[in-house]
Image (tube, rainbow, N blue to C red):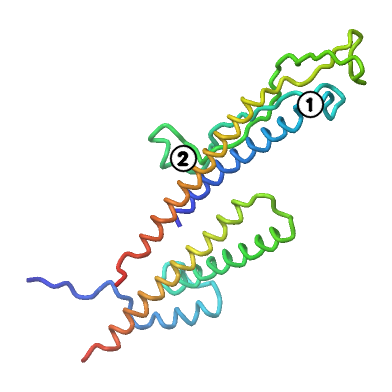
Amino acid sequence: MDYFSAFAISASGMSVEKMRLDVTALNLANVHSTRGASGQLYQPLTVISTAKPGAFAAAMTQAGNASLGAQVTEVRATLTPPRLTYEPSHPDADAKGFVAYPAINPVNEMITMMTATRAYEANVAALNAARVMAMKALDIGGN
Amino acid sequence: MNVDPVGFLPPLTEVAGLQAADAGNNVGTSDFASWLAKEIGSVNDKITGSDQLLQKLATGQVDNLHQVMIALDEAKMSFQMLVQVRNKLLEAYQDVIRMSV
């Protein structure tokens, strides 16, 4: 059915927002991590998403927007300088007694989380609208 | 007033096509019976597919909840459409049966 393409588009948006939430949660979990998986300092991550090109092209190229939803193209580290705290007793302290913590701003992360949640909700709303339309279409000629 | 004859209805020999659709899928894809058989098959595929997804979710092999929900919804909508097609068919059939000749 034609409505399933609307479902697929909304699903791709939901996947992207879910990814964004996962990455934000990872950042928040590593607020006090002095070492990442590679032994280096943990770098705050950010999700880069773009429109996904797809076979929907015929209908959408006229609007100059040949896309079949959204996709995550990259999860990249934001190259921000670390936050230095004076803790000489910490095992990861440098020669001067400073420990480098990742520059994660909890306020920014919370805002990213809220916008991701709202965007996810918006995708669900769009999907429900498509569903209601399809169900209404099935009511044609009833009674 | 000019009334068109009922020319768009297929002749009764189409019943043979229905039986052929039962036997296999080598019938021409243009007739209604094979279309209906195909659609019923795809609805069935959707329902079994969503069933498998649900099983995977229960056993923790799927971490994408919305995909499962969307698959369930697609299956539900496909089935609703099938039911509506069946209702219309039955309605038309009963109209014909009640027709006094």
Q: Which percent across, then down, holds residue A81?
A: 73, 14
Does dot 1 land on a helix, a strand or a loop? loop
Rendered view: A73 above or below A134: above
Mark 1 to mark 2 CA distance (whole Å): 46 Å
Neighbour class for label 1 at 10 Å: few (<14), some, many (≥20)? Answer: some
Q: Secondary structure at mark 2?
A: helix
Q: Position of residue A66 (x, y in %)?
A: 47, 36
Q: Give left or right: position of B33 versus B101.
A: right
**Split into 4 quadrants, where in the image is the N terminus of chain B?**
bottom left
Residue drawn at point x = 74 percent, y = 33 percent: A29
Q: Position of residue B29 (x, y in %)?
A: 46, 67
- For disc 1, the marked residue is A32
Q: Amino acid at mark 2?
A: Ala
Mark 1: which amino acid? His
As rendered, which of A98 and B2 lies closer to the eye?
A98
> Which residue in the protein does label 2 denote?
A57
Residue sitting at 54 percent across and 65 percent down?
Answer: B42
> Label 2: how many residues lie within 10 Å, few (<14), some (14-19) or many (20+)?
some
Pointer 1 or 2: first along the chain = 1
In the drawing, does residue A92 fall left or right of residue B24?
A: right
User: Could you say which quadrant of the image residue B94 lies in?
Assistant: bottom left
A57 w.r.t. B43: above or below: above
Quarter of the image that includes the C terminus of chain B: bottom left
